[in-house]
Image (spheres, rainbow, N blue to C red):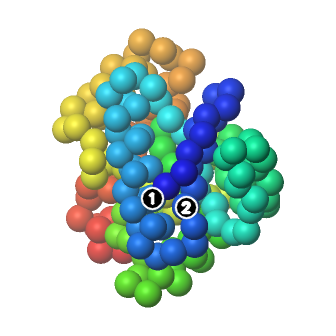
Amino acid sequence: MSNTIFSDTILLWVPDDDGLIYSFTIACEKLVCEAFDQKWYLRGAIAFGPAVMDLEKRIFIGLPLVEAHLAEISQEWIGVGIHNTARERYRSMKAGAPTDIVPYQVPVKEKKIPIQAALNWAIFADSNVKSQLRHLAIEAPAHKEKYNNTVKFIEACASESFANK
């Protein structure tokens, strides 16, 4: 997996290979959890497609970068939305899509493109993450909706009815 950071963006990518994509997915989940433990509340998106990713020359060009950026800024929570290009790529995996790519109507800001799948990072989260989010909603009322939306996602992922979708 390759990565770089610029400004407030963490950029991760892998070649188009089922095994690497699966490892990438788990790495993204763990990153969200580890960042949360450090009080860095991440919002991200995964998109797939051809792109030029030249780390040495610092050249990053391609439609998936634009799609991931637009999906990321649309979201109103802590989490990772799955762009439609990524949903299709996950579905095409020989072993099937990882079970941690879940159907979920990601909360988005008004008049933004809907995102219909998410990365279930909550499977790696500490058991007290919901109480931390509820506390944050009280401490930072300006972000209350984001924190509450995240709690709803975690609860949906934990529910038996969600697991049977």
Q: Helix or strand or loop: what does disc 1 sit on?
A: helix
- Where does residue 50 sit, x and y in percent of width and height? 73, 68
Q: Are marks 1 and 2 in contact (CB under 8 Å)?
A: yes
**Residue reaching furthest left?**
127
**Residue reaching furthest bottom?**
94
Q: Earlier in the sequence, mark 1 or mark 2?
A: 2
Q: Is residue 73 above or below residue 163?
A: above
Q: Is residue 84 left or right of residue 21?
A: right
- Where does residue 86 sit, x and y in percent of width and height? 59, 68
Give the quadrant of the C terminus.
bottom left
Q: Is residue 158 above or below residue 165?
A: above
> Can residue 120 be seen in this snapshot?
no
- Where does residue 110 sit, x and y in percent of width and height? 72, 43
Amino acid type, mark 1: Phe
Residue neighbourhood size for the residue with mark 2, other residues' Cα within 10 Å, grouped as few (<14), some (14–19), many (≥20): some
Q: Which of the labelled discs sits on residue 24, or is there none?
A: 1
